Image (cartoon, helix red, strand yellow):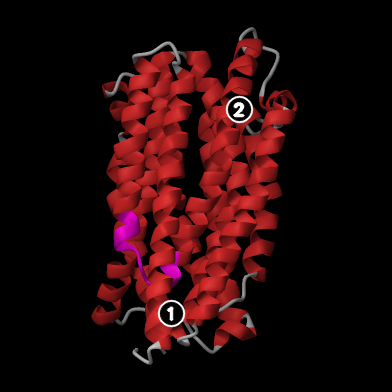
Amino acid sequence: RQVRRSVRQGIWAAIPFTLLSVPPLWFSGTVFVWIGQNEDLALAAQSYTRGVLPGLFFILLLNVLRSYMTAVERTRAVLVVTLLAVPLNAILNYFLIFGAGFIPPLGVWGAAIGSTLTNTAMGAGLAWHCVRARPFRRHAIFARFWRPDWTTFIAVHRLGIPIGVMIVLEVAVFGASAQIMGLIGVFELAAHQVTIQLAAITFMVPLGIGQAATARVGLAAGRGDMERATAAGWAAMVLATVFMGGAALAFWLIPESLVRPFLDDSGGAEAVLSLAVTYLAFAAGFQIVDGIQVTAAHALRGLQDTRIPMWIAAFGYWGVTMPVAIWLGLHSSLEGRGVWLGLAGGLATCAVMLTWRFYRLTSKAAARVHAGRP
């Protein structure tokens, strides 16, 4: 029953957050112009943000259901839905962006529509699976959905709001780094976006490892088995480090091969390639600390520790990354390289502090267990 209540209130929370997201996404073009971005780029971005609005609730629903499935250690459906969504999104984007037959080319707007349709299909697909599949039927997460449970609603928000703020801080700092790149130059912004895309692809693996760590650490801690909880957290960090170390080597050894698929034959392609190769060298340096910080943060969530990690993220991203990126990017000859140094420094700060936090909490909990105290 408590599982059903927690998931149901998580879905309830998605509704107001969807509504709160409408104004900034609808008027995003005005915001981009206000902070100094090119007007054409701002209008293109606004076209995209408006196009993804209809699927926003389904993105949040997808996240709630994915977290639920991870917590009960039934993640195969998430993998299947994701694998089906990748080709679906690619096909929809191709036809809607470039047009085909009776479908006119819609450009950025078409990409937004394709993403909206894909996200809607993923959220609805997982919801249907939760209703129909036997392992989830016993929880009946949509039963009496209209009934509020304010105690659980508050508990979910107390635990979840710091996580949400932490994610917003992280997304915002990367968004702000793109704004800084846009002020430096168009080629720098394009190269930055290519590098971010490559870093985001590799980031998905430690992110998945981190979500598994949340479940494993949480289950072990709930049983009072701090030895297993500690082992699960450290194992996740080691796995993430090994994988991201391999990704860093690829960024160092074959940068041009990784960047070229993102470029066309336009006149500025070589300039973007040269800059992106340079940025990848810096991105390689932060791959490892990025993997450590995300798995450490997720391991702490398994211990229901979210408030202090939120403040750590605020300090790392906005107390370290932004000042360094602004100063080196806009007030030194490093320019775009300085922005990436700022990103690497902020992530390294978070990695060290979050890892130390996990060590401290698990050590104290283990000491209490050995002393016979709850």
Q: Which residue is mark 2?
A: 281
Magenta span:
300-310
| Above or below, comparing residue 274 to residue 298 in the picture | above
Give the residue drawn at x 36%, y 52%. Answer: 166
Q: Amino acid at mark 1?
A: Ala
Q: Is residue 365 left or right of residue 268?
A: left
Tell me residue 81's x, y (percent).
Answer: 65, 61
Of the pair 332 and 174, the residue shown nearer to us? 332
Q: In the picture, which quadrant includes the C terminus?
A: bottom left
| Residue 122, magenta (yes or no) | no
- Badge 1: few (under 14), some or many (20 or more) residues near its Cα, within 10 Å? some
Tell me residue 240's x, y (percent).
Answer: 61, 54
Give the residue drawn at x 48%, y 52%. Answer: 293
The secondary element bearing badge 2 is classed as helix
Asked if marks 1 and 2 touch (Cβ < 8 Å), the reply is: no
- Badge 2: few (under 14), some or many (20 or more) residues near its Cα, within 10 Å? many
Q: Which residue is mark 1?
A: 366
Of the pair 289 and 279, the residue shown nearer to us? 289
Q: Amino acid at mark 2?
A: Ala
| Above or below, comparing residue 349 to residue 166 in the picture | above
Tell me residue 53's x, y (percent).
Answer: 41, 46
Residue closest to the far bottom: 372
Q: Is residue 6 left or right of residue 155?
A: right
Give the residue drawn at x 43%, y 50%. Answer: 352
Q: Is residue 369 left or right of residue 187?
A: left
| Above or below, comparing residue 90 to residue 292 in the picture | above
Which corner quadrant of the image does residue 310 belong to? bottom left
Q: Is residue 104 visible?
A: no
